[in-house]
Amino acid sequence: MEPRNQAVVTAIVRILKPLVRILLRHGISCPAVEELLRRAYVEVAQEEFAVPGRKQSTSRIAVLTGLSRKEVARLRKLPPVEQVELDERYNRAARIISGWLRDEDFLDRKGDPDILPFDGPRSFSELVRRYSGDMTPRAMADELLRVGAMETTPHGEFRLTARGYVPMAGDEEKLQVLGTDTRDLIETIDHNITHPPAQARFQRKVLYDNVPVEHVREFERLAARLGQNVLEQLDEWLARHDRDSTPGVQGTGRVRLGLGIYEIQAPAEASIHEDTSDATADS
């Protein structure tokens, strides 16, 4: 096997192990995943590996993927596996919380998120109208109350209790994040592999592998505080340049643009084959 291909295989094994852990926990068998993998191979080959100027054929997809023509033909007839509704609900809830944190119309005199009545000119319903399009205020209130992002006061008003939208552990939405966030990270890595350094997207990591366990909680608090500050500053900038949040924004095309931050924590024994340098900064 060529060194480059061996590096790909090694990377795939590292990706698959935590993924398989999740799959086994939810009772998803290897044959079921194999079917999904076949579908993904066919969809990517069809959408991204066609010969320029020519329609992608079943025969060419079979050559690219190693699947039989009969299998490719069967898979091409299946609808794509997508859950657009969950993505949209996640994005809308996140936009509402973001608006509540930074829009002066919904802040108190100290600049903190104000307690909002359900209806009125300066209310939760107005917040939803401004930042969530056609989502009904009641449906969004039920969602934010369900995940604990806000609470109801004794007077029936709403108080924000979280600075971001985090679905409940084990919920369907939480697993949806597995697909969207992992996809975004892998696509960034793929972009940086296939493009020159001058066109690289931001991708960095800081990691030390000999830290006493007594410092974990302190690091978690520090990372959460600094990470939240960075994300809120970027959120403010993105909101000013996003046409859904700021309808007057001018420009062409449409792209998803953002930055993800996540904590890394694992026993040293699980990382014995990793790079043992004190810190890494990957780009």
Image: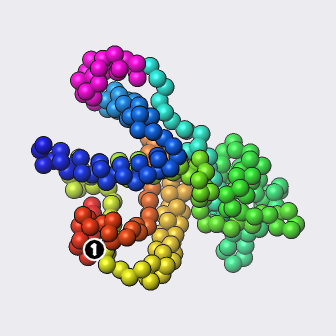
Residue situated in front as seen by the camera: 71 or 130: 71
Q: Is residue 170 above or below residue 56?
A: below
Q: Is residue 52 visible?
A: no
Q: Residue at x 58, y 49 (%)?
A: 173
Q: Is residue 71 above or below residue 245?
A: above
Q: Residue at x 69, y 42 (%)?
A: 134
Residue 93 at x, y percent in the picture = 63, 53
Give percent across and percent down for residue 65: 27, 29
Q: Is residue 214 left or right of residue 196?
A: right
SS label for mark 1: loop
The stretch in magenta equals: 49-76
Which one is in front, 114 or 142? Answer: 142
Q: Residue at x 70, y 44 (%)?
A: 135
Look at the image and tell me in which quarter the N terminus lies: top left
Magenta run includes residue 181: no
Q: Position of residue 189 (x, y in %)?
A: 31, 52
Residue 272 visible in the shown view = yes
Residue hosting label 1: 279
